[in-house]
Image: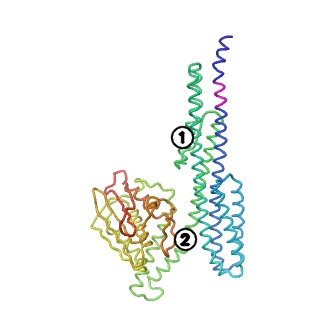
């Protein structure tokens, strides 16, 4: 009896600890599931809002041109879907910033839709409202960014809660070692292992690694939490695939007019529309070559968020730099001629080991960005030399320059700086992001340097030789 009583006294604290731990872990599982589900739902709804705004903008633009009543029907359908999606999103426990942004978007969308209907009999005037849909799209992107921040915040909180539970369990086990060493060891194996698995899964999800399934072995509650985390992983993959499908749809819409422009340029170059002067022939050639380049850039955009920019993805060979710079400069003759920009190139005969296509894209994006922000009749400089086993390329312009607080952020995907080019079409914010990724794939680095004179000064540093594994 005394042995049973002693055993009972030894087991009683363990039973209490196990019950307490089970309750804590169950609450963690429930709260984590609810938080992650709400965050994913908010992100999914924000993505749907972006697609619906794009549909409304396209319909409004088409109606202003074609004035067909059926296009208004499509616009009304997209409007109803937008209202329904916004209603569902309001039912979620959103952050105050998300609630405010969603309310502003709903108000602006209702105003635009009412404005389009009011101009039903004057379709040409609808064109004046189309640009406002672009502002609405920007707000939707900000709402989506808030959703991603919420997912990251919830993931961080779950990691913190898991760590707190882990510490609490650890100290309980330490206290029980003198009286129930064997039971403590068993409890450690039973509880700590799945918690570590959960922490590892949360770290992988936080780092954007969705390839490895989440598997948790242990108590049923933790296994259920593991299944929920794996469900989250699958949902995040689906969201990424939705973004991919959207980009493919946009590329399909772009390729049709792009093909028409290319065919027209080829007809002009072949003389099918009549004889042309040498300068006109040169313009036709530049148009044809740039349509091909634009098609390649569209394909790069589609692959941007899935391709891992690693050395193993490079097609390394010896690349002569002057011809690459010449091709890039020739491709931008028209926009430079239109703005009266002078291009100064200082590049001695240099050669490095690298991917010629990616190097051309790097220089093309930098020169395009410099042209975009250069004032009329300004000058752009490209200087290349070798320093200490590195190829150093510097591109400078006489534009407004880059604010000190934006020198790192301008290389982030989809980031739009505060300074906008006068009269330029607003870009996607991917050009400099692609530059950074391609430079990193070569083992190099890119940075914005300080400059005493007005304008931007961007420097690339690329290794002249690539490791054998990069070939």
Earlier along the polypeptide chain: callout 1 or callout 2? 1
Residue 137 is drawn in which quadrant? bottom right
The residue that label 1 is drawn on is 200
Q: How many marks?
A: 2
Residue found farthest to the top: 1
Q: Position of residue 72 (x, y in %)?
A: 70, 74
In this view, the mark in front (1 or 2): 1
Q: Nearer the viewer, residue 444 or 17?
A: 17
Q: Tell me, yes or no, if residue 433 can be seen here.
A: no
Q: How is the image coloured?
A: rainbow
Residue found farthest to the front: 452
Decide: few, some or many residues near mark 2? Use Cα within 10 Å; few <14, some 14-19, many ≥20: some
Q: Is residue 185 above or below residue 377?
A: above
The residue that label 2 is drawn on is 254
Question: Left or right of 371: which side holds 51?
Answer: right
- What secondary structure is marked by label 2? helix
Identify the residue shown where x is 65% and y is 55%: 96
Q: Tell me, yes or no, if residue 222 can be seen here.
A: yes
Q: Position of residue 330 (x, y in %)?
A: 38, 75
- Is the Cβ of the residue at disc 1 closer than 8 Å to that at disc 2? no
Spatial distance from mark 1 to mark 2, Cα to Cα?
Answer: 42 Å
Q: Position of residue 200 (x, y in %)?
A: 54, 40
- The magenta-colored residue range is 14-20
Q: Nearer the viewer, residue 66 or 338?
A: 338
- What secondary structure is marked by label 1? helix
Question: Left or right of 62: which side holds 273?
Answer: left
Decide: few, some or many residues near mark 1? Use Cα within 10 Å; few <14, some 14-19, many ≥20: some
């Amino acid at each position: 009896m005394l042995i049973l009583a002693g055993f009972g006294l030894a087991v009683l604290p363990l039973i209490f600890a196990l019950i307490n731990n089970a309750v804590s872990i169950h609450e963690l599982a429930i709260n984590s599931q609810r938080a992650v589900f709400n965050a994913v739902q908010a992100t999914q709804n924000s993505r749907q809002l972006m697609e619906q705004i794009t549909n409304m903008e396209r319909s409004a633009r088409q109606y202003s041109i074609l004035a067909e009543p059926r296009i208004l029907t499509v616009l009304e359908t997209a409007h109803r879907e937008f209202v329904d999606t916004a209603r569902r999103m309001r039912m979620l426990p959103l952050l105050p910033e998300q609630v405010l942004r969603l309310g502003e978007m709903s108000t602006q969308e209702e105003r635009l839709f009412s404005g389009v209907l009011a101009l039903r009999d004057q379709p040409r005037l609808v064109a004046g409202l189309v640009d406002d849909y672009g502002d609405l799209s920007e707000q939707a992107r900000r709402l989506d960014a808030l959703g991603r921040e919420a997912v990251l915040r919830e993931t961080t909180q779950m990691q913190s809660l898991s760590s707190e539970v882990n510490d609490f369990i650890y100290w309980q086990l330490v206290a029980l070692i003198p009286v129930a060493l064997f039971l403590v060891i068993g409890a450690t194996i039973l509880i700590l292992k799945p918690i570590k698995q959960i922490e590892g899964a949360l770290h992988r999800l936080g780092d954007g690694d969705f390839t490895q399934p989440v598997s948790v072995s242990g108590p049923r509650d933790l296994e259920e939490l593991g299944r929920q985390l794996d469900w989250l992983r699958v949902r995040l993959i689906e969201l990424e695939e939705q973004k991919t499908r959207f980009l493919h749809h946009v590329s399909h819409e772009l390729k049709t007019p792009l093909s028409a422009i290319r065919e027209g340029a080829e007809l002009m170059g072949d003389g099918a529309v009549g004889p042309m002067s040498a300068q006109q022939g040169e313009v036709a050639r530049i148009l044809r070559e740039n349509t091909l380049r634009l098609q390649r850039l569209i394909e790069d955009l589609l692959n941007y968020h899935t391709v891992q920019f690693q050395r193993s993805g490079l097609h390394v060979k010896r690349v002569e730099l002057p011809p690459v710079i010449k091709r890039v400069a020739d491709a931008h003759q028209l926009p430079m001629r239109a703005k009266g920009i002078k291009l100064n190139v200082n590049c001695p005969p240099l050669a490095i080991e690298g991917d010629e296509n990616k190097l051309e894209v790097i220089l093309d994006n930098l020169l395009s960005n410099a042209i975009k922000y250069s004032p009329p009749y300004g000058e752009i400089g490209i200087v290349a030399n070798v320093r200490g086993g590195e190829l150093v390329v510097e591109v400078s312009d006489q534009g407004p320059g880059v604010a000190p607080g934006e020198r790192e952020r301008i290389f982030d995907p989809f980031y739009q700086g505060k300074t906008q080019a006068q009269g330029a079409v607003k870009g996607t914010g991917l050009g400099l992001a692609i530059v950074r990724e391609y430079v990193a794939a070569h083992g190099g680095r890119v940075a914005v340097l300080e400059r005493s004179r007005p304008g931007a000064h961007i420097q690339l540093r690329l290794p002249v030789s690539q490791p054998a594994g990069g070939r």
